[in-house]
Amino acid sequence: MKDPRSILITGASSGLGAALARAYAAPGVTLFLGGRNEDRLRQTGRDCTELGAVVRAATLDVIDAQACMRWVGDCDRTAPLDLVIANAGVSASAGGHDMRDETPAVMGRIFAVNIGGTLNTVLPAMLAMRARKRGQIAIVSSLASFVGAPGFGAYIASKAAQRLLGESLRLELAPDGVEVSVICPGFIRTPMTEKNEFYMPLMMDADKAARIIVRGLARNRPRIAFPWALYAFTWFGAALPPSLTALVMNRLRKTG
């Protein structure tokens, strides 16, 4: 969608969500920002207010279905939403855990936030947009969603679910005038990735990633995947027979 005026972003207290909020902030724009860290969310709000936007921030956890869905509905009634970005997400490292040691509790949290939180955000927005025959939904997945890897099962599975959900909703909602895009970034420099202890190729600053996403959403691209070199690598990996993928992943695991 070009020039959205009423925008809701989850996970806006830091990282990519905060960068997206700043990228969209401008006079005449209303930003509804959700996040768990009140102090960082307040700072994001101040940054966006200085850029001319009207900011309405709410401290909430997207896994609280009733609170999240009520918030989205309230935002839409305040200023009918043009664009909703379901960005909130976690990995094992975000909870202070080793990503190669996903426990049942950690895995449950990952699914609750990445999948449950996405549904809690997207479903009420989808109903409102469908009723008025316009709007755009963006779901932040990951390039990790294309290929399985040992020790990252819950995170990769949750991102794959987000990607396929978005791609399915795009087909379902197109006749109703609602645009849906899936965002599949590579490694972005955020507080979450700072905890990773493995090599992250082609690392990108959050502000640059946000600019790429804004351009892609303005063009209603179905999948916004970047950087291209890493996207090509993961696409090729996904096309390999599972036996070859296993050989590559086991080799990387032994050398990692």
Image (cartoon, rainbow, N blue to C red):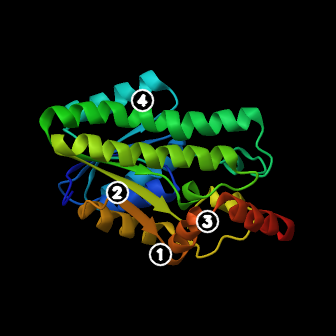
- Observer-nearest of 116 and 246: 246
Locate the N terminus by quadrant: bottom left
- The residue located at (42%, 42%) in the rendering is 165
In front: label 4 or label 2: 4
- Furthest residue toward top: 66
In front: label 1 or label 4: 1
Q: Quadrant of residue 219?
A: bottom left
Inter-mark Cα distance, 1 to 2:
29 Å
- The residue beneath circle 3 is 240
- The residue beneath circle 1 is 228
Badge 3 local density, few (<14 within 10 Å), some, or many (20+)? few
Mark 2 residue type: Cys
- Observer-nearest of 155 and 50: 155
- The residue beneath circle 4 is 68
Q: Is residue 9 above or below residue 3?
A: above
Tag 1 and tag 4, C-beta contact below 8 Å = no
In front: label 1 or label 2: 1
Badge 4 local density, few (<14 within 10 Å), some, or many (20+)? many
- The residue beneath circle 2 is 48
Which numbered circle lies on residue 214? none
Tag 4 and tag 3, C-beta contact below 8 Å = no
Mark 3 residue type: Leu
Mark 4 residue type: Cys
